[in-house]
């Protein structure tokens, strides 16, 4: 599987939007996109008008990069969403939001989705009492996600206990003292704050 190893800030500049790939740095004055919001490359600032197909492609690429998934996996999410009842684009975003690495990030247990993915890979969490180290694991309503008992005394998680809980999505709850959270419901479109035009992705794949 191909892995992007260049600067994450180039991805924000390429998509013309802040993707918040580097955690707190993205909210600070050090953010590269704030300093230079033009596409990377010698001719980035002078690029011409993008076609409809180009806009759809960029929306897909932006969404992939926000959630940190590769093309094949992203296509599978679309196909799964298309088989589900309801609106395909909204179903797809709901599936992406329900990835375990994203849930860990949303609960404030990771500063970025990339960090959350690494924590999941290193088997720091359990789902309903069972260790899960697969970042793409899809959680369900009622699932309990918790830091494993043998990891709770790690310095990193001890610090989280003293931090204030940020803006928690209403479909999740998290208790920093217990280092435990719960999926209260499946995320609806209005619960997802990412600036994504999902209908453009559906139009791209429908061609």
Image: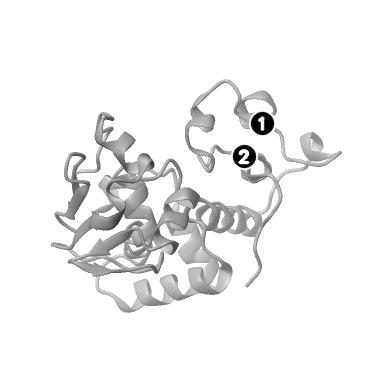
Q: Say whether marks 2 and 1 touch (CB < 8 Å).
A: yes
- Secondary structure found at label 2: loop
**The N terminus - image quarter:** bottom right
Taking depth in this image into account, of 175 and 8 the one nearest to the observer is 175
Residue 148 visible to an observer of this rendering: no
In this view, 12 is above or below 52: above
In this view, 86 is above or below 64: below
Residue drawn at the location 37% of the way across and 47% of the way down: 105
Compared across the picture, whether 3 is left or right of 144 comes to right
Which residue carries the number 1 mark? 37
**The C terminus - image quarter:** bottom right
Which residue carries the number 2 mark? 16
In this view, 133 is above or below 64: below
Taking depth in this image into account, of 70 and 148 the one nearest to the observer is 148
Taking depth in this image into account, of 78 and 102 the one nearest to the observer is 102
Residue 74 visible to an observer of this rendering: yes
Residue furthest toward the right? 42
């Amino acid at each position: 599987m191909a892995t992007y190893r260049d600067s994450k800030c180039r991805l924000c500049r390429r998509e013309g939007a802040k993707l918040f790939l580097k955690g707190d740095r993205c909210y600070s004055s050090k953010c590269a996109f704030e300093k230079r919001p033009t596409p990377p490359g010698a001719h980035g600032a002078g690029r011409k008008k993008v076609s409809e197909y180009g806009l759809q492609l960029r929306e897909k690429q932006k969404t992939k990069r926000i959630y940190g998934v590769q093309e094949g996996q992203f296509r599978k999410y679309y196909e799964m969403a298309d088989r589900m009842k309801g609106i395909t684009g909204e179903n797809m975003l709901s599936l992406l939001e329900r990835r375990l690495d994203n849930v860990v990030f949303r609960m404030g247990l990771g500063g970025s989705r990339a960090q959350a993915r690494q924590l999941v890979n290193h088997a720091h969490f359990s789902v309903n009492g069972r260790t899960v180290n697969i970042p793409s694991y899809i959680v369900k309503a009622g699932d309990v996600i918790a830091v494993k008992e043998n990891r709770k005394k790690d310095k990193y998680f001890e610090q989280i206990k003293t931090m204030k809980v940020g803006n928690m999505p209403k479909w999740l709850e998290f208790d920093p003292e217990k280092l435990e959270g719960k999926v209260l419901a499946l995320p609806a479109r209005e619960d997802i704050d990412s600036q994504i035009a999902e209908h453009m992705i559906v139009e791209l794949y429908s061609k």
